[in-house]
Image (cartoon, grey):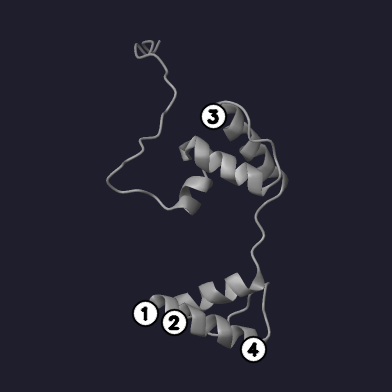
Amino acid sequence: PAPADPSPKRAVVPFLSHCVSESFATRLASPSQLTVKELKVELAKRGAATSGLKGVLVARLVALQAASPAIRSAEDAEKDRAKAGESRAVEHVADIHPTQARQARRKAAAVAK
């Protein structure tokens, strides 16, 4: 018989570094890493209640994220494509008109400067 594991099982708590902060989008994917203020702002954007302790706010945001996955605009997809240097020939679900594509590339180039 295998010996019993002497170490107790503990919940994994993510370490939040103050030296190298993660982007808001990265932390939004894991709402428990958001601050209470950030949670309340995200819940308010989605028209949800903003009262309660952090655990309640996290649970509320997770439920909202599961119910309605984020939908990106075609313009945002084109900006990503321009930033990555992809050709318009690359097939994507959210394609936009060529004039919108040119505008997005100009904006992405202006931001990159």
Q: Marks 2/1: CA distance?
A: 6 Å
Q: Residue at 65% x, 34% y: name it.
A: 60
Label 4 vs 3, first from the N-terminus: 3
Residue, disc 4: 98
Residue, disc 3: 54
Element type at mark 3:
helix
Query: Can you name the residue that lies furthest to the left here?
Result: 19
Horizontally, is 66 left or right of 90 in the view?
A: right
Residue, disc 2: 109
Check contact, mark 2 vs mark 1: CB within 8 A. yes
111 vs 5, nearest the viewer:
111
Q: Position of residue 59 (x, y in %)?
A: 62, 32
Vertical placement of residue 51 versus 70, above or below: above
36 vs 4, nearest the viewer:
36
Please say whether residue 100 is visible from this viewpoint.
yes
Label 1 vs 4, first from the N-terminus: 4
Check contact, mark 1 vs mark 4: CB within 8 A. no
Q: Residue at 46% x, 38% y: name it.
A: 33
Q: Count neighbours of disc 3 (C-alpha within 10 A) and say few if under 14, some if 14 to 19, many if 20 or more.
A: some
Find residue 72 and report its image quarter. Answer: bottom right
Label 1 vs 3, first from the N-terminus: 3
Type of the residue with mark 3: Lys
Type of the residue with mark 1: Lys
Type of the residue with mark 2: Ala
Q: Count neighbours of disc 2 (C-alpha within 10 A) and say few if under 14, some if 14 to 19, many if 20 or more.
A: few
Q: Marks 2/3: CA distance?
A: 39 Å
Find residue 71 and report its image quarter. Answer: bottom right
Q: Position of residue 64 (x, y in %)?
A: 68, 42
Please say whether residue 89 is visible from this viewpoint.
no
Horizontally, is 105 left or right of 50 in the view?
A: left
Residue 113 is marked as 1
Q: Marks 1/3: CA distance?
A: 39 Å
